[in-house]
Image (spheres, coloured by chain):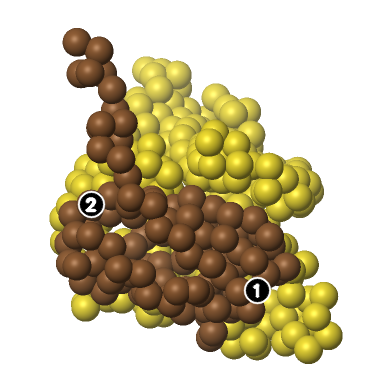
Chain colours: A brown, B yellow
Amino acid sequence: MVMVFLPVTALAKTPVFKIEIRDHLFHPAETAIPANTKVKLVVYNRDKTPEEFESYELNREKVIMGGRKANIFIGPLPPGIYPYFGEFNPRTAQGRIVVE
Amino acid sequence: MLINSVIFVLREVLEAAMIISVLLALAVNLRETLRWLLVALPITAATTVLFAATLDTMTDAFDGAGQEVISASLQIVVFLCTAGIVYCAQKQRYGVATITRMLPVLMALACVSALTREASEILIYIIGFAASEDHRTAIFAGSAVGTGIGVSLGVLLYAALRAMPPERSFSFCYLLLALIGAGMVMQSTMLLEQVDWLPVGRPLWDSSALISEQSLTGQLLYAVFGYEATPGPIQGWLYLACILAVTVAWALGQYAGREHYGP
């Protein structure tokens, strides 16, 4: 009976992917994640300056202060390429999530 | 850096400019004083600084969901205010005897809630990057230009709303408030999805090929309608529910006003 009330997230562990921001660049610039699965991105901002993780395709936006990290859940998503960027440094900070 | 600053600041300012223009036009239509704006602006300045200064702590709150939960709450408050404003404005319009004092309070609250987050993002951006000698001029110039364009578009909207015959102007103000409010609620659900407080549904459609969210049209539509190229079922249904709620508030306000004015 108790199981029924547990959130779905507790039953299936959510895969975690790490992304770092260094010198206004995303490392890795490309992250492959499984299709139709919810995943958690942990974005570490190693710069001193703030950054805003932003993606129109993923519908995500989050300010990450310098030296801090942020959790961002995405998916389940169909296969495809989903670009994201750093709104404060859009020319250099470009990355993408490849769902396969 | 210059162009980036212009675009970034414009995006943030546009949404705020739209809502303030509609509220101003509505207040002037109702012959309200603009004291609510004079009260709201310094409060917004204070909440903006507070928001930016506590963002670190906020982000870690609620198990890492703090930033989203607080932003989403502000957006939901904006929606509740828009429904309340439409109700009060309609009541005031039809029941001359009842000058409801809630209206300026709701307008001020809508203004503070709508502006705080956007303004604090600008503040974080400027403080974060203006420290570096190379970027300073570009950041300040870009921010000024972005703000200028955003405010100009707001002034244009205000002028357009004021130039219309009163009947039509009221209708447009209500419509825009409903759309802005519903858009805010829709955006808030995406923030809650971002921290796994709401499940992500399969998108109802994908209109990104038709109107990209990155394009100027997309940005304008986002500022006014909360345009979303790939809305999920939660976003779609909530958007409709919010429009319906404002419509009900509009009808109730008219009814209450007439009732009071009496036969």
Q: Specify few, some or many for label 2: CA neighbours under 10 Å numbering under 14, 14-19, or 20 or more.
A: some
Along the line of sight, which residue is nearer the eye, B201 or A69?
A: A69
Instruction: Tell me where residue B231 appears, x and y as whole percent.
Output: 25, 56
Residue B128, horizontal then vertical, whole percent: 74, 69
The residue beneath circle 2 is A37
Q: Nearer the viewer, mark 1 or mark 2?
A: 2
Q: Determine whether, in the image, residue B145 is placed left or right of residue B132.
A: left
Q: Is residue B98 above or below residue A48?
A: above
Point 64% across, 34% down: residue: B105
| Three-letter residue code for mark 2 | Thr
Residue A79 lies in what quarter of the image?
A: bottom left
Q: Quadrant of the N terminus of chain B?
A: bottom right
Mark 1 touches mark 2? (CB < 8 Å)? no
- The tag on residue B167 is none
Q: Which residue is mark 1?
A: B147
B166 versus B62 height, above or below:
below
Query: Disc 1 on helix, strand or loop?
Result: helix
Alpha carbon separation for disc pair 1 and 2: 40 Å
Q: Position of residue B56 (x, y in %)?
A: 68, 48
Hey, which quadrant is residue B257 in on the image? top left
- The residue at 76%/50% (across/down) is B53
Mark 1, chain letter? B
**Is there one chain holding both mark 1 and mark 2?**
no
The answer to which of A27 and A66 lies nearer the viewer is A27
Using the image, name the chain to which the residue with label 2 belongs. A
State whether residue A47 appears in this view. Answer: yes
> Which quadrant is the C terminus of chain B positioned in?
top left
Q: Residues within 10 Å of mark 1 (few under 14, many from 20)?
A: many
Q: Outermost residue toward the top?
A: A1
